[in-house]
Each structure stands twice: as structure tokens, then as C-alpha cells.
Amino acid sequence: MAKEPIGSARIDTNEAAAAKEPDTPQADRDEIASQMVDRYALWSGAAGLIPLPLVDVATVGGVQIQMLRKLAELYGVSFSEDLGKAVLASLVGSMIPATSSLGIASVLKVVPLIGTPIAWMTMPALSAGATYAIGKVFIRHFATGGTLLDFNPPDYREFLKAQREKWSRRSAISTRAPTSQDSPTTTPH
């Protein structure tokens, strides 16, 4: 009896099937894309742990390009690496506060004693949050029939802001310690 693949293997299988079938329902495609963005956000967070300044930023950029390539494939959008990098750079440029924080966190790794611990605490969250927001923007763009050629970052400014806030709330909830209100109370018998 064959076992069903679990975790990311199942998502990869769904991605490939959805990309091959142009008549995949939009809701299914969007759900697969959302799971893909979550996975790439986690990979970006892990890349933020690379101890070498700027190598971590380059790795995060590589993860984001790969995510964009896979999203384009899923939505049947033509992808070229050069155009993908240009579009991603234009979007990242519109996220100046978030991306400058990413660079600062990376460079902090060279500050003796305190720099590395501070960078290791902030860089993964910043990397994952930026990747999550970028992925959500491209899901929306591709789902509405957009391509890399007609992408215009200012059109997504408000949406991007909402996605960053959503990621911040999501991160705060996942890092919050459980309280007595969060767990069911039981009474001894």
C-alpha cells in the first residue's frame, strides 16, 4: 500500500499538478500558492540565520526569486530570471523601511559581542516577513491575470502594507506565550 506524501512533498506534487492543468480552479491554485509562500517565507527566515553579513541577504534574495519562479509557473505566467530580478527589485525598492531594516540587521552581524545575537533575533523575522508580503503580492497579481511585464509596485502599496501588518500579527501570535485564557481549564475530581 503506497503512502501519501506528507508536508512539503504533498505541496510540491499539488504545485506540479496545478501548473500542468490550466483548468485548475482558481481557489485551489490560490491555496497551493499560499502554502508555497508560507514555505518560502520559512526558508527565508532560515536564510536569515546565515552568520555572514550580506551573504544572508543574497540568499534571501535567491529564495525570493525561486518563489517568484514557482508562483509564475503555477499561474502559467512566463518567467525570465532577469525580468524576475528586476520586478522583485522594484517591489523591494517600494518596501524601503522593511528592506533597509533587513540590510541593517545583516550588517549588525559584524559588530562584536552584541551585533550577532541582535541580528540572529531580528534577521529571520524580517526575512520571512518580507518574503511573505512579496509572495502575497504576486499571488494577487498573477491571480488577476497579471504578468511580470505589467507589474507596477505602486499599485500594490496598500495591499503590501496590509500583508506586512498581517505577518506582524501572525508572528506576534505565534511567539506569544500561552496564557491561562488560551488553555482550557480543568477542575480536579
Image (tube, rainbow, N blue to C red):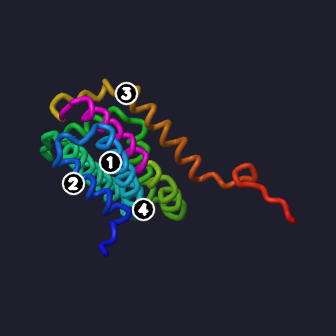
Helix, strand or loop status at disc 3: helix
User: Residue 148, how many percent across, how many down?
Assistant: 18, 35
Give the residues in magenta. 127-147
Q: Secondary structure at mark 2?
A: helix
Q: Nearer the viewer, residue 134 or 53?
A: 134
Residue behind mark 1: 32
Left or right: where does residue 51 sit relative to residue 76?
A: right
Mark 1 or 3, closer to the camera: 1
Residue type beneath disc 2: Ala
Tell me: 186 left or right of 75. Answer: right
Q: Is residue 177 above or below residue 172?
A: below
Task: Describe the element under mark 1 as helix, strand or loop.
Answer: helix
Which residue is label 4 attached to? 49
Q: Which mark is residue 157?
A: 3
Kind of element beneath mark 4: loop
In the rendered structure, are the residues bearing label 3 and label 2 in contact, judged by CB atoms less than 8 Å apart? no
Q: Is 95 above or below relative to 113?
A: above
Give the number of the disc on residue 16. Answer: 2
Image quarter hosting the C terminus? bottom right
Residue 76: where, in percent of width, then height? 16, 41
Labels 4 and 1: the sequence-earlier one: 1
Q: Earlier in the sequence, mark 1 or mark 3?
A: 1
Q: Residues within 10 Å of mark 3 (few under 14, many from 20)?
A: some
Foreground mark, 4 or 2?
2
Q: Residue furthest right?
A: 189
Quarter residue 25 falls in: top left
